[in-house]
Image (cartoon, rainbow, N blue to C red):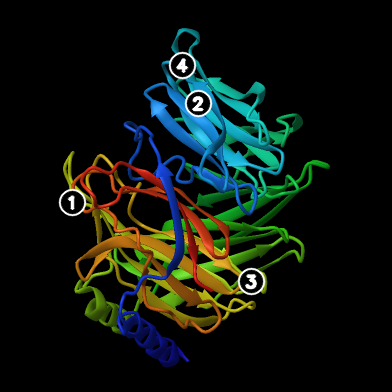
Amino acid sequence: MRNRYQLHFLVILFGVFASLYQAQAQKIKSAAFTYAPEAAGDQYNQRIPKKAFSVSPTDFVILSRKSDNSYAVERYGEDLKARWSTKVNLLGQETVEAFSQNQQTVMLITHRVMADQGSQALYGRLFDVASGKELKQTKLVEAPSRSRRPAVAVSADGSKIVAYHAITRNEELKSMQATVYDASLAKIKDRTYDFAGAGTQVSAQVQVDNHGNQFVSVLTNNSMRLSVRRYNNRDNEIKVMEVMLGGVFNGEKMYVLDTHFQLHQDSSLYAAVLVAEEKSGDYRSLKMVRFDYAAGNMRFAEEFQFTPAFTAQLAKATGEARLQDIYLSDILISSEGQTLVMAEKKYTEGGENSDYHAKEILLFAYNEYLQPTWNSVIIKNQVAPSTEGFAGISYSAHLVGNRLQLLTLETLKGKTDLYTRSIHLVTGAAEPPKAVGLNVANDKQVAFVKDFTTWLDERTITAVNRPSKASAGLRLSRITFKN
């Protein structure tokens, strides 16, 4: 069985390079666009990687930074003209924390530090999606300024929000105080996530589904055991599931190096983890677990081991003998239950002003029973200056039925453009990369802003880029692809 997966890996890998990179855009409409790039924050882990959302087959809303302390929430129509633009002024020590929308409103959450009061807080603002009018502003959660930064989780449909902050002692996480809100930022319930007796841990992740159920994931036992708890808003019932993902195997101690979670709306949580050897730091395997709270059980995918044969095969494609700098980036689940785990190689060269690199993407596919079906790799080589980080490189992914659509900024055969790739989740069949036809600039200035990319429908996307013409500035484009 494993040999079949490896053979499929090669077929897809070489198939990517089998034909010409031809333009596929049927229609491109563009207009001038201005924004001020984010000058602060962690360029490696963008706090808000997505700043554009579709609100209709023709319209979309965006969050655009205009200056050091001001943003604008804007809605654009089919003609790429702003239907409305609402300015948002921030205080001196205030930064954006989250951005989302639902059918009625657009939500912006900011983090504010009140140094004179010794506290910090998250504030939520709501804007009417039809008119842009600011409807509400309210404090969601407050914590001492010396505590960890408060955080927020938003459901997939934007209808539920959980704002929370950590209670620690000697850097050890003891509990979290949380409040659940609805789409109008009205309080639903206060919650305490108590980790007493759970062992030593340093952090936890929170997801919330469209019903308001919260899923709290904690790594314990020195990053070897994963515990997931589900809290509902009806009562104080807490359902806990946990599993050992690390441990000692063949005399070698293994631990969880990286995790990624994807919440499904059927009351299940998918968790993918990369396991590494403690002594060498080498990647050992990929594991995935589905925590099914409707059925009350866990389902485990077959462990994918990074064997010498696999790493040698990958080395032929990438030119690098060792698996390193790989991070889990996505878990995509189709309506029929097929699952795709994505992991991307991302790193900096070292040093304060070093370049950022985003390279190959590893793909691991599973059927609806979490049985592995195929695996593959997408080869790309993207570089960006330290001032941009990953804002223009890496990838944007969109799932339509059983087909994965990827959008990347690359230079292939001397042509710099946005390229699309299409991969079938069931078979792994992949089309070659196709140039959109925007003729993106290739110099040391901002050429593509991935944050503003969104799919309006299966064939139409929006993108912000700078054409190769020397006099051209940034352009907001609406791109329609051929059938």
Q: Earlier in the sequence, mark 1 or mark 4?
A: 4
Mark 2 lies on residue:
111
Between 259 and 252, the residue placed more toward the observer is 259
- Residue 4, compared with residue 110, is above or below; it is below
Query: Which amino acid, mark 1?
Result: Glu
Mark 1 lies on residue:
349
Label for residue 299?
Answer: 3
Separation of marks 3 and 2 at Cα, in angstroms: 38 Å
- Residue 217, compared with residue 177, is above or below; it is below
- Residue 112, compared with residue 258, is above or below; it is above
Q: Position of residue 461 (x, y in %)?
A: 50, 57
Query: Which amino acid, mark 3?
Result: Arg
Is residue 260 something one can see in this rendering?
Answer: yes
Q: Residues within 10 Å of mark 1 (few under 14, many from 20)?
A: few
SS label for mark 2: strand
For discs 3 and 1, the disc positioned in front in the rendered view: 1
